[in-house]
Amino acid sequence: MIKPIQWRNRTLILLDQRRLPRDVRYLRLKRVADVAGAISTLAVRGAPAIGIAAAYGVVLGVCAQMRDGAARRNARGLRRALDRDIKTLRATRPTAVNLFWALERMRRRFQSLPAAATGADAAAALEDEAVEIHREDEARCEAIGRWGATLLPKRATVVTHCNAGALATGGIGTALGVVYAAARAGKAVRVFADETRPLLQGARLTAFELKQNGIDVTLMADSMSASLIRKIPVDAVIVGADRIARNGDTANKIGTYALAINARYHGVPFYVAAPASTFDLTLAGGKDIPIEERNPDEVTGSNSQRIAPAGIRVFNPAFDVTPAELITAIITDKGIIRPVRVRTVMSVIGGKRKS
Ligand code: MRU
């Protein structure tokens, strides 16, 4: 399965997802600023993947400090540089909580070092932590897949939105992890993928990775899913998540909310698949989730071509919030949350989360 993130010889290798499916090209990054740029321009994207990339970014920052002799002499300098790097990485994208979660883990690992620790000690410890975050995500995807596969019949038709697959995580994906796990378990799964305007993660990424992995996939424009669901029996809508509040309200790619309303109207189960690291138990509900607004050019144009009149006002939130009441269940690595309520979220995720 294609890997969006690799770590080799203290170099971060990112599959440049902006170029997919046309070109399969890799970026080799050594600097925090480049990692931040890759996250904000969506060279790496998807909630778990940006957390993993940012964790490696912190390691690159410490390695850069070590190359600079001053930091080796001054532990306080190292800490100041780490704070600055974390601030840079935190400022890239506001919605996916995995980014902040991973960076806090990195900060805490640094803080747990003994006072006499050298720059080399710090780099080694932070590298261990980043690799652990990456490995954990891979395992969490497998667990989500196993739980989720139990929800699908032997022959299943699934609708998905955006890309919550291998390209968005350190493993087989969350929503698409369920599809892969069901296929591995011998179920015949076919997927209808929304193209996901404006950045087309469905058309460019989900269609690409499902096809590459031999899954039966059909692409459609976002506006077509209501007609599809009325026309053919759909067993489940499964999407990923960028941040889930304590009551189960879920932020995910713009268009998810409309799809959830559509599923409810037609009586189709609507599942969110996400690891424990996507839950933000500090937030009571979805109205507190910060929603990223992106450049108007993403809506006024397509493929570098302007399609709207110059000067037009644009509404371009990258995510929306689906209220818990529209979500049939949340499939996590720790089990299935159903019904979706504060009580059930807290009993599956609360207290057990490594945060
Ligand atoms: O803007 P993106 O491409 O980072 O948005 C990604 C999504 O909305 C995904 O559905 C979400 O991050 C879950 S990825 C497992």
Image (cartoon, helix red, strand yellow):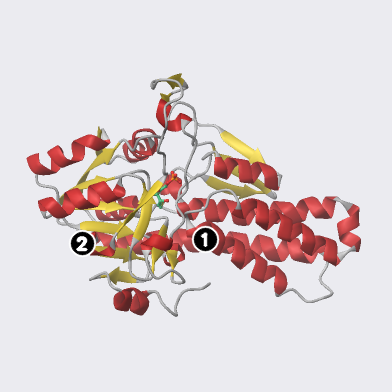
The mark total stands at 2
Mark 2: give few (<14), some (14-19) or many (20+) Cα within 10 Å: some
Q: Is residue 198 left or right of residue 129?
A: left
Instruction: Give the vertical position of 321 relative to 147 (above or below).
Output: above
In the image, residue 108 lies at what x, y percent? 65, 71
- Circle 1 SS class: helix
Report whether residue 163 is seen.
yes
Q: Name the one closer to the observer, 104 or 334.
A: 104
Mark 1: give few (<14), some (14-19) or many (20+) Cα within 10 Å: some
Q: Name the one closer to the observer, 199 or 286.
A: 286
Q: Residue at x 50, y 35 (%)?
A: 295
Q: Is residue 311 left or right of residue 41?
A: left
Q: Which residue is mark 2?
A: 151
Report whether residue 154 is seen.
no
Residue type highlighted by circle 2: Leu
Instruction: Give the vertical position of 284 relative to 347 (above or below).
Output: above
Q: Which residue is mark 1?
A: 135
